[in-house]
Amino acid sequence: MTETLTEMLVIFIKIVCALVWLLALTLYLTWLERKESALIQDRLGANRASIFGIRIIGLFQPFADAIKMIFKEDFVPPFSRKFLHTMAPFISFFFVAITIAAIPFGDTLRIGNRTINLQILDFNVGLLFILAMLSLGIYGIIISGWASNNKYTLIGGLRGAAQVISYEVALGLSLIGLIMVYPSLRLSSIVLYQGELLFGFLPKWGIFLQPLGFGIFLFAALAETKRVPFDLPEGESEIIGFFTEYSGLKWGLFMMTDFMEVIIVSTLLTTLFFGGWQVPWLASDGFHFPWGGELLLPHVVVILLQVAAFNIKVFFFCWLQILIRWTYPRFRYDQVMDLGWKLLVPLSLVNIIGTGIIMTI
Amino acid sequence: MIKALGYFIEIIRGGLITTRHFVVNLFYHILKVLGIKTKRKGSVTIQYPEQKKEIASRHRSLHRLMTRPDGKPRCVACMLCVTVCPSECIYVEAAEDPDPEIQKYPAKFIIDLGRCCFCGFCVEACPEDAIRMDTGNVEFAQYSQQDLIYDLDKLIG
Amino acid sequence: MQERANEMIKIFIDEKPVDAEEGTTVLKAAERAGIHIPHLCYHPAFPPEGSCRMCLVEIEGFPKLELSCSTVVKEEMKISTKSERVVEARKAVLEFLLAEHPLDCPICDKAGDCKLQDYYYEYGLFESQFKETKEKREKKLKIGKSLILDQERCILCTRCVRFLKEVTKTQDLGVFHRGVHSSVNIYEGTSVENNYSGNLAEICPVGAITDEDFRFQTRSWFLKEGESICPLCSRGCNILIEYHPGFSRFELPNRVYRIKARENPEVNGFWICDRGRYGYSYLDEGRADKIILNKIEGENVLTWENISEYLGEKINSMSSAKKTSGIALILHTWLSNEELFLLHKIFKKDLKVEKIFFADLPEGEADGFLLTSEPSPNRRGAQEIGFDIKAVDLSTLADGTDFLLAFGPFLSGLFSPKYLKGALSKIKRKVLFSSYSHELNSLFDVVIPVALIAEKEGSLTNVEGIVQGFQPALEPPGESLPEWKVLCDLGKELGMDSKFYSEFPSPETILSEMGEKIPFFKKKND
Amino acid sequence: MSPEFSEKTKKKIEEIVARYPQKEAAILPVLHITQQEFGSISAEEEKLVARILGIKPIRVRELVTFYTMFSRKSLGKYHIQVCSNLSCSLLGAGNFVDYLVEKLGIEPGETTPDKKFTLSTVECLGACERAPCMMINFNYYGDMNPKKVDEILDGLK
Amino acid sequence: MKEKVLTEHFGLENLYKIDVYQKQGGYRAAEKALKKMKPEEILEEVKKANLRGRGGAGFPAGIKWSFVPDTDKPKYLCVNADEGEPGTFKDRYIMSHNPHMLLEGIIITAFCVGISVAFIYIRGEYEAIALRLEQAISEAYEKGFLGKNILESGFDLDVFVHRGAGAYICGEETALLESLEGKRGNPRLKPPFPASVGLFQCPTVINNVETIFNISHIILNGAEWFIKQGLPKDGGTRIFGVSGMVKNPGIYELPLGTSLKDIIFKHAGGMKEGKKLKAVIPGGMSAPILTADEINIKMDFDSLVEANSMLGSAAIIVIDEKTSILDVLKVVTKFYSHESCGQCTPCRIGNSWINKIVIRIAEGKGKKEDIDSILRLASNIEGNTLCPLGDAAALPILSITKKFRKELESYV
């Protein structure tokens, strides 16, 4: 009984930790986005929000934004489908947020004789689960575009759906090669495989085994996030997007979904191609460098190092995505579709075939 | 294919440029946070309410009416500013001054700043140099339109 | 106009052949040919003075530049008004004038229609070389009931002196001292007190004499001019109404700022009297701008569209016997010829109404020049049309009358309100056409705001029998419209000769119809 | 108290007026007589002349201010007019005036406090052959020098 | 050297009395004219004599008279004795010496033109002369030379003396008329000329005193003789008034065409106190100035016009080397700005402006451009005014400024 209760408590704590981690990162990603864009553009970025006059380089900005969003008028257009209109952002948010469940943050933690997986749920089909959830998120977009009962939002929604579905194909196909290399759909297994060494010194990370797959996945994932340069569904600056009719917290949810997608993409990139929580040459008892020599570490330190490595990698990809968003101009719609169908899909097929050939050899 | 590769290289280069900006600016920001003064700054931003950009000498800011040595307005209510104003935001009503050397003075001089487009024509047109836009005051935003209607007292004071 | 058509001779102005009347001056001939020669002291009403030297022209065969205002044209005369020498001379004269002229255009009411300014823009445009001190003179001298003299601005054209000498013959102004110290002044203890003093400010080519009535009110360039006829006496002086079209943002206290004389040698020459000049408040003050419905039984709201319907219905509903005895009409002579003609046709000829009265302002005093004693601009017209001008007799008016149609606000000036109320209360239906919101209005069932003479089209017959047409100079305020429109419709409504009324789209057509019917009006209007 | 001419003068004026077809033409002679009789032509005298000639006082004022010989201020017993024009100034009229100014203690245009002398400088008196010349009450004195002036003025006292 | 005509008997005592004058043959010409000649003959004679007006403009008197139309209106003769031109004193001189000769001329002129009233407009300052003239007039009335039916010829004439009151402008003929009518002396527009519309709107002859002085001599001695006294185009002698820095200032009756140098150095005795000649104004102040090099010139209308000057009233003002030309200019400009009637703009303001500039230069605050300003302003006045006063002011100012520019520049 107590065992079950403890088990539930552990899972609950894991859920809370993962969500807090996700949401906090989301919040600060908004700040990061502002700051990074400012640095790129020789500006200062948000630095005004303060608490009792303390305004540590604008770190309170996300809170200010949140408060603002909460207190803004939640306007529902009189001509809209009210229920669906209200539901849409939550659908979007939910399906993105839930993907975090399958992401491994670290190796198993041993406290006494209890082992705790640093992963909410260790699915055996984790990868499929993530792909499924990501593709379900499109409902939020489509529903919001349609429920607003506005031509422009509908167009935005349709574009979003078309784009996401198109890239879903490339995304999925790009991962086939990976699954062929690491013969598992279980994310924790994939990460573990990546702990092995290639030629005795190179970590067996996805990037090294599947460079083409990585490229396709990166592009496809960027497109999935619907951010610049693939922001055709929203196109804040000129095209009117699917959430035009939203305001206040509901609009905030869309915004958060956006950033959460960035994080999810980053975690996926980390997990699938950059070894997840793996630190090169770090085994569960310490470092074993390929040139000989060992650095033995206590278990807690190893776990902390792994979690930190995971975070650093995720963080890097977040940074990279923001950099991309502030560097490149938007594609034209036909170019987006061309890129997806005419380049990425064939390339991923080539990747699968190539991987197969290499593996059989 | 080579062309596409060229594009690809350019795309990468673009990313590198933004990255360079990011890194360099970050470096200077960090230096600043550490209190090390450098010639170059990490940003071009002016922190407006605390930091103010120096207003150019020709900048057209809030109007003011000049006065004679005895404090009377220098304006003689010739209404040339009214005539020249493209947004019709000036209203002048003249009255008789007992001093025969002055004769005419503005009993009312109203500028509706809500309509003013700050073209400065009134200053150009004024034959008495009675109106100027050199106060340097650019912060006169108000919560109501009524508060933007400036009368003689406000313009002199 | 009195001049008999002289023989025409041919002269050349600026190498352009021009026909000129024999005996006329070069200036007049040029003006006729559309060539403007600048002049300051010359005024067509006075003999040439020749002192300002602005009108100098070069005439072939004359060694010096000649005055165009006094030189008489001769056959084959070759005149050049724009040669370099002439322009140089003009420039020189302007330089001299401006040397002693204060540069207080900003406070000068004349700025905008100042000849000196105009000529400076046209011929001057030089930098001032005058470094000496200007002569100090009186800046603000009250010389008449509403005139202010600024001796510094005076350029000694002596138009004012000559006006007072030759037109009013009062000689109130004189030129004192000589040389550069010369100045126009009044004799101490006297002032320009006559009914034409306002003309002084108008003929002054600069701002030396300004009008206190207009002083500092506005600037002349804001004003627009409208031609009209003065309705304040039966002379029918031609006037220009100067009104302000207004600012988009700020409200102005009034529309009309001043009245100026309009040249008409047959009627008023170049002048108007002070009564006409300063009495323009009637155009703005107390105007009615909405249809007032005091007592309406069962009807819907009246608009201009259905007034005639309303009136026609009321008149038609009366029994035929009652039509002649039950209807009474109070008219006034501010109505135009056309309106009076329509009224005469409808009520006197067709309906045979007998009770037609005229209510006008009481007689005033004539001044022997332009102002006449009757303050009714179209009395002569009413007589010529066939009205018998009877004063209002309230007991006759009220006796057996069911329907009263009154025009004008003058009724209240003739009778005490109490008496008027008593008499009018006996009448069942009363309709008033008036331009003013007045206490009189409360005594009537319906009050319809109408346009004044300055706001409508039509014609007036002055005391000498001259029929003068006029066009609207101002927009009528609010819902006001001219009476002739409703009268035409009423004629149609009553159905007596509806085709007849349908033919009148404008007062012009009514006047030509009048010419057919009444010989007096035939061709008088052109 | 309005001034009035003596009977003798009135007769004389009538005689003068009779010379001219228009009464107004006699104004200059009459003004001369007035000046002689009253010493100056002030507003009262102007009105008197105007009344006699049946014209408006303003016409009289126009002339009195136009012609330099009429004085609106009362003059001293002896009106010394010194020519300051070319011929006289060539021969030292300027010094001569200075001398008179010093001697009489008055500036040109002023009258001595005892109402005896009025000094004025005038334009050419038409006696250039005797330059520098002066005129005391219409009597010409030519070839002036300080010594001669002393003699003449002393003779007048 | 030809004989003196006008000033012949000036040495005589009491010449101004009619008895003395008659003894010298006075009023013989009047008698001859009235009794033996017809008006047309007189006019013919005067025309033939080429008597040019002595006032300044030099318009032939006979032609002037012939302009008078034949109307029912009364006609007037105005004798211009308003001698205001600085440097001129001849009229005062001859009138005070021989008033009867003037009256005789008036009688003949009036008879010739058909005038019954003559006014002698004399400047106000000449009170003594006015009295002398009045006395002479009363004497003439007594002797029957004036009044009704003069010398039984049926011709009536009244002569009145009208005193001006100190206005240079009244020497201009139309201003004189205005002044005579009791108005401000503002010149009138011409045409109409006074010969047709003059005093009180009637035809009027206006002549200078000296012109009228000559009439009796023409009648007495004939036109031929008269022309011989002067030049063919310009009959008679001329009275030159010399003033300024000469030994013997005064009037000299000389034939026209006498050289200026002779007049100054021979007749007037040369420069005073051995001073050096600097400049000469040959015809009253309104005549353009002549420098010392230019004095070798014949004094007649045409020669002087050739030298860009004018004979004017033949009043010669001699300026010596010591005199500053700025002072001369100051006096000249002050005079004209003081005497401008104020009617025409260029004269009214231009003269005062130039005067202000000159005063400023004299105060030491002048600038180089000021001299150009003076030239520009003066030439803008010239020819742009109603009456000749504008020209009279502009010409001397222009000539002085041009000819002595160097000296003027030394003051700025």
Image (cartoon, grey):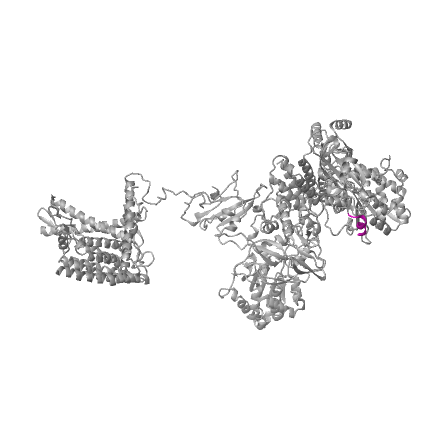
Q: Does E129 sit left or right of E397 as displayed? A: right
User: Residue A36: percent from the left, percent from the top?
Assistant: 28, 48
Report the front residue among D4 and E193: E193
Q: Is residue C393 above or below residue E25?
A: below
Magenta includes E187?
A: no
Quadrant in which the N terminus of chain C appears: bottom right
User: Residue C326: percent from the left, percent from the top?
Assistant: 59, 67
Q: Does E101 sit left or right of C336 as displayed? A: right
Our reading of the magenta stretch's main secondary structure is helix
Report the front residue among E391 and E221: E221
Q: Does E153 sit left or right of B146 as displayed? A: right
Specify whether residue C55 is in view. Answer: yes
Quadrant in which the C terminus of chain C appears: bottom right
Q: Residue furthest left?
A: A113
User: Residue A92: percent from the left, percent from the top?
Assistant: 24, 58
- Which stretch did the figure color magenta? E59-67
Q: How many marks?
A: 0
Q: Residue D136's quadrant in the figure?
A: top right
Specify whether residue C188 is in view. Answer: no
Q: Residue E310's quadrant in the figure?
A: top right
Q: Residue E263's quadrant in the figure?
A: top right
Report the front residue among E288 and B53: E288
User: Residue E216: percent from the left, percent from the top?
Assistant: 86, 44
Report the front residue among E47 and C333: E47
